[in-house]
Amino acid sequence: MEETLATPDATRRSLSPSCSATVKSRAAGFERRTKRRLSETNASVREDREEAEEEEDEVKEKIEALQRIIPGGAALGVDALFEETAGYILSLQCQIKTIKVLTSFLQRIDQEDMKFGG
Amino acid sequence: MDLSVLDRLKWLQQQQMVSPEFLQILGSDGREELKRVESYLGNNNDELQSFRHFPEFGPDYDTTDGCISRTSSFHMEPVKNNGHSRAITLQNKRKPEGKTEKREKKKIKAEDETEPSMKGKSNMSNTETSSEIQKPDYIHVRARRGEATDRHSLAERARREKISKKMKCLQDIVPGCNKVTGKAGMLDEIINYVQSLQQQVEFLSMKLSVINPELECHIDDLSAKQFQAYFTGPPEGDSKQSIMADFRSFPLHQQGSLDYSVINSDHTTSLGAKDHTSSSWETHSQCLYNSLRTDSVSNFFSLK
């Protein structure tokens, strides 16, 4: 009688802690997995944001440099700045051509004067 | 046989009711065990008293009641009495006990089976809740993206298109920008090119400033010659001197100019004062247009 009655108690005691342990371990693992995935996604997002921010910072610095170089460029936005840069570059190119032509003309005149004078 | 079957059923019912008490007894002390045994006997007596009202089982019931009440004495009596009827009753008692044990085992197994199933259900509920927790975040993020594309993203795209077009124009203007990739690199090339152009402009403007005083000298020479021509015009007495100056300058000119001088000399000898005046003006104009301005000026001053 005692042996037959004791067996169910033993089975109950043995099953209950194992079942509870398995449940807890499963829950903990699931939580850990979710946390890892979330942390990984957050890290990747942060890296992408950092890279984008660095590029944007570089571009902003160079835009500011253009604003300094071009006359009247400090108060302009990106679109207007690019237009002004294009116009300014073309005007500088024209100035260079005109000055080269003048210098060549004057040099020729000087040469002729030297020839006839000598 | 009918009586034995009924008795068995009664015993089964009684033992089913008593099963938790047995479990408690096992866990408790000796005194508590004895007390519970007495309570067990008391309960049995009460249940049996309920059956006394049945008239059919009157005489047999009395005998069974005596047997149950004297269980302890029965263990001692068989040595003395050796009755067949008593032995049969003992056998009947033993069999139902075995059956009750089997049923108890089945119940225990059923309970064990139910518990893990319940735990499994709890696991499923946990997984469902966790999945539900994840889904709304994901959907929420996507919804925001959709809204952004619908409204703000279009404006951003338009800006980017404008900027890209203007960047292409600058690439066409600046020589080295086609090879570079990336906004930062292109901006660097543009900045360097603009600075180089500015430097060239400054350098060339310095060259002009160096050459400018020569231009001023030339202008001064022209104005001086005009003044001299105006001064030499009115005096008629000096016409010979002016002719002599022109004559000296002629050999440096080409043959055409020499022929012209011969013609002038003939006219002067043949005609009067009017011819002299016309010839003198022509010679002065030739002097002005000639490239040898300095020589003519020096000769004029030397004659005076």
Image (spheres, coloured by chain):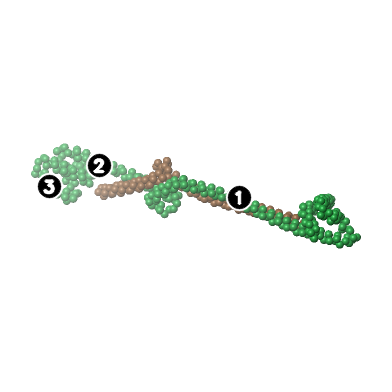
Position in image of residue A55 (x %, y %): 48, 49
Give the residue at mark 1. Answer: B129
Residue in front for this viewpoint, B28 or B53:
B53
Q: Residues within 10 Å of mark 1 (few under 14, many from 20)?
A: few
**Which residue extends farthest front?**
B55
- Say whether mark 2 and mark 1 are on the same chain: yes
Give the residue at mark 2. Answer: B221
Q: Residues within 10 Å of mark 2 (few under 14, many from 20)?
A: few
Inter-mark Cα distance, 1 to 3: 125 Å
Letter of the chain that mark 1 sits on in the rendering? B
Q: Is residue A97 left or right of residue B259?
A: right
Letter of the chain that mark 2 sits on in the rendering? B
Name the residue: 14% across, 42% down. B278
**Camera sees residue A54:** no
Marks 1 & 2, CB-CB < 8 Å contact: no
- Say whether mark 2 and mark 3 are on the same chain: yes
**Res. B263 mark:** 3
Image quadrant in which the N terminus of chain B is located = bottom right
Amino acid type at image mark 2 = Asp
Amino acid type at image mark 1 = Thr
Task: Tell me the shade of chain B.
Answer: green
Q: Which chain is brown?
A: A
Nearest to N terminus: mark 1 or mark 2? 1
Nearest to N terminus: mark 3 or mark 2? 2
Q: How many marks?
A: 3
Residue in front for this viewpoint, B154 or A112:
B154
